[in-house]
Image (tube, grey):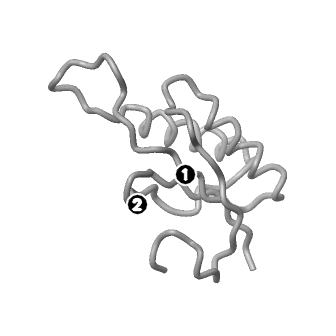
């Protein structure tokens, strides 16, 4: 089975934005970061991120568990990413995978 790490980030609007601005610019920031890490050959983005209740979930795979967790840790410490992010290690056959597959 392919190891997958789900990165769960609280779906919290970025404070101090103009009322008409997109409330979650950190989602694009995380997606761009993960694409950059993927381009380095370190990890692979498994699927598009998705909102799941009050969190936004990103999926990464194709690396050792340690590498995947390192990437998840780096996501959690990016400027603008809300506090409270966490990772779940799963596999592509797990019923714990957030999205319906």
Q: Residue at x 71, y 52 (%)?
A: 43
Locate residue 62, reporting x and y percent.
73, 62
Q: Residue at x 80, y 49 (%)?
A: 67
Tell me if residue 74 comes above or below residue 99 in the rendering. above
Q: Along the line of sight, which residue is nearer the eye, 41 or 91?
A: 91
Q: Quadrant of the N terminus?
A: bottom right
- The residue that disc 2 covers is 52
Q: Are marks 2 and 1 in contact (CB under 8 Å)?
A: yes
Residue 67, numbered label: none
Q: Along the line of sight, which residue is nearer the eye, 26 or 8?
A: 8
Locate residue 55, reporting x and y percent.
44, 51
Q: Residues within 10 Å of mark 1 (few under 14, many from 20)?
A: many
Residue 32 left/right relative to 25: right
> Which image quadrant for residue 23?
top left
Label 1: element kind: strand
Number of numbered discs overlaid on the protein picture: 2
Residue 76 left/right relative to 98: right
> Which image quadrant for residue 35?
top right
Locate residue 40, reporting x and y percent.
71, 41
Q: Residue at x 67, y 45 (%)?
A: 72
- The residue that disc 1 covers is 8
* C-alpha gap between disc 2 and disc 1: 9 Å
Label 2 vs 1, first from the N-terminus: 1
Q: Residues within 10 Å of mark 2 (few under 14, many from 20)?
A: some
Label 2: element kind: strand
């Amino acid at each position: 089975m392919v190891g997958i790490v789900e990165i769960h980030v609280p779906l919290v609007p970025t404070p101090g934005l103009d009322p008409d601005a997109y409330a979650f610019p950190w989602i694009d920031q995380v997606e761009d970061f993960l694409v950059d890490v993927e381009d380095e050959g370190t990890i692979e983005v498994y699927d598009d991120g998705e909102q799941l209740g009050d969190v936004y979930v990103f999926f990464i795979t194709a690396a050792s568990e340690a590498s995947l967790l390192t990437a998840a840790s780096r996501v959690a410490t990016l400027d603008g990413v809300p506090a409270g992010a966490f990772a779940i290690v799963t596999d592509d056959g797990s019923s714990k995978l957030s999205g319906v597959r």
